[in-house]
Amino acid sequence: MAGYEPVIGLEVHAQMRSRTKLFCGCPTDYGAPPNEHTCPVCLGLPGALPVPNEKAIELAVRAGLALGCQVAPHSRFARKNYFYPDLAKGYQISQFELPLNEKGHLDIEVEGEAKRIGITRIHVEEDAAKNLHGIGSGAVTLVDFNRAGTPLIEIVSEPDLRGADEAEAYLKKLRDILMFIGVNDGNLEEGSFRCDANVSIRPAGQTELGTRAELKNINSFRFVKKAIEHEIARQEGVLQGGGEVVQETRTWLEAQNKTVSMRGKEEAHDYRYFPDPDLPPLAFDAKRIEALRQALPELPEAKRARWQKDLGLTEYDAGVLSAHPEVAKYFEAAAEALAKRADKMKASEAGKKVGNFIQSEVLRHVSTDGLSATFPVGPSAVAGLLAVVEDGTINGKIAKKVFATMVDTGKSARAIIDEGGFAQVTDKGAIEDEVRRVLEANPSQVQQYKGGKTGVLGFFVGQVMKATQGAANPKMVNETLKRLLDAP
Amino acid sequence: MAEPKIKLDEVLHVAELARLQLSDDEARQMQAQLDSILGYLAELDELDVSDVEPTFHSIPMDAPLRRDVPVPCSDRSEILAEAPESEAGGFAVPLVLEVDS
Ligand SMILES: [Zn+2]
C-alpha cells in the first residue's frame, strides 16, 4: 500500500464575549426568544449604518496578540456576498484584504513532540442568523436573527497539521487560550467555538498539495478526530481505487459515522469580496496595541509553568487546576490566602496543600457553564479551613468532615469547629491514656514491634485514630507511641 | 468586433450568483453593456499609479467605534409584520435542506 501523508488546515470561528453585537447595540445573550434581539442593523434593513463595537475589536486584537500575530495598524471590512436565508443583507461583513491580525503561531505538543503551527490570519466578522428546521408546521425554515451580527473571529491556520491528533491538540490549546484571555466561552455544543477542516492527502514525500475537501459541522473534539480520520481514509480509498479527490464541501454526520458531500455549494464559493463602503478603515496605533499587549492576561501555559515553579504543583496537578479559568483563579486566590494566614508558610507549601485539597474535595462540587463556574464555598473559606489544619486545631481527616458541613451550611470552618466539637485532641494526658489502652489490647503486635517489626507502628496509629474518631493529633500520637514502645 | 472584455459564460455565471434568469437575448444585451462599461474603466489602466496609495475609503477617516453598551431592540411583532410570512417568532422561508445525502 502506498503511504499517504495527510495535510490539514483548520478554520475556527469563535464568538467573542462582548455584551453587544459587532455593529449594533443588540445584546448577544444566548437563549432569548427568536428575533427578540434584533434591530434594523442586524436585520440588514436598507439605510441602517453599522458602527463597530470597540470591545469586540479589542478582544480580537487580544486574541491576535496571544497567538503571536502582527496587528495591522490599518485593517478594513469587506463584504462577502452570497445568498442564504440566514443572511438578510445578501452579504456578510467580514475582512478580506488587510485583516486585523496576521502571521501568528500556536505551539502544540503531540506524544511529547513539540510542533509550531502557523496561523495565517485572524479576522473579524459578523455571525449569520440561525435557521431552524422542523419547527412549527415543518413545511418552512424559520430564521432567527438573534445570533445575526454576533462578533466572531475566524482563526485560519496554515496547512501545517499532519494528522487528526495534531488537529485535536491544536483545537484544544486554541480553545484553552481563548477562554483564559476571556475572548470566547469555549462552548462547542452551543456553537460558540466552531471548526471547519480542510483535509487533503498526498503521497509521502511529495511537496505539491493534493485536492482538498472542506469538512463542516464538527462540533465536538471527539467528532474532530473521527471526522478527520474518516475523511483521510475516504480519500485514501478514492486514490487507491484509481479515482480523484474532488474539491468540495463535506459535512460530518455523526449518527452515520461518515462525511457526505454538500453538493451544489461550489458556485457559492465565488464570494466577490469588496471593501464595505459603510465602514471606514479600522485604525490601531502602535501605542494602543502595546497597551493591549501589556493588559493581556497570563496565558494558561505560562500559568502552569509558574505554578510548578512557585506553587509546588506537579505537571498533572497544574493541568487539572487550569482546566477552567475560574478554577485557576480560585486556586490562586486560595493559595495566596493560605500563605498569608498560616505563619511562615512558603508559597510552594500553601500551593501544594490548597492544590491537593481542591482536587480531592472541592472540584466534585464545582460546575462550569461557559466561562462561569459555581463553587461550593469561596476560596478564602478553603484557606481558612486549611489554616486551622495547619495550626493543629483539627487534622486532615476532620477537615474533610468540616468541609462537608461548610458546603451544606455555608458557615466558616472556625464556626463549625467551635460548635461541633471537631477540635483536635491535643491533650497530652488524654492521648497517652488512649495509646496505653491500644497497646494493652494488642500484645502480639507489641511483641512484633519489640522484635524489630517497626512497621506495625502504623497499625497502632490507626487504632488510636479510630478510637478517637480521628480527633487525635497524629503527630502527638506518633511521638507518644514511640516513647512508650521504645521505653526499656 | 474586438474580443469582448467579458465572455458570455461569465455573464451567465454572474447572473446565476445574483439569482437572475436571463434569456439568450438579455444575456447578450448585458454582455454588450458590461463590455462598454469595462472598456470605459479600462482607460484607468493607462495611468501609472505605482506611487499612489490604494484608497481604502472614499472619505479619509478612521472608523468611529461604539461603546459596548446594550440599547433597546426593535419590537418583534412590528418587525415580523413586515415579513411576507412568519411563524413561531421566526421569519418563515421556503424549506432549506442543509445537506444532500
Ligand atoms: Zn441589532
Image (tube, coloured by chain):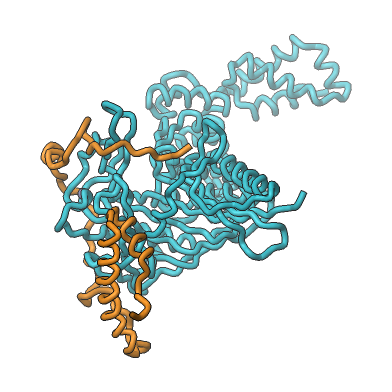
In what quadrant of the picture does the C terminus of chain A appear?
top right
Q: Which chain is cyan?
A: A
A369 w.r.t. A467: above or below: below
Left or right position of B93 against A294: left
Q: For residue A340, say whether it is visible.
A: no
Q: At 23% across and 63% down in the image, what residue appears?
A: B65
Coordinates of residue A46 in the picture (x, y in percent): 16, 55
Q: At 60% across and 16% down in the image, what residue appears?
A: A468
Coordinates of residue A311 in the picture (x, y in percent): 56, 49
**Looking at this view, is B36 or A175 the one in front?**
B36
Q: At 60% across and 47% down in the image, what residue appears?
A: A312
**Looking at this view, is A163 or A45 the one in front?**
A45
Chain B appears what colour?
orange
Q: For residue A355, say whether it is visible.
A: yes
Residue B96 picture quarter? top left
Residue B57 picture quarter? bottom left
Left or right position of A428 against A374: right
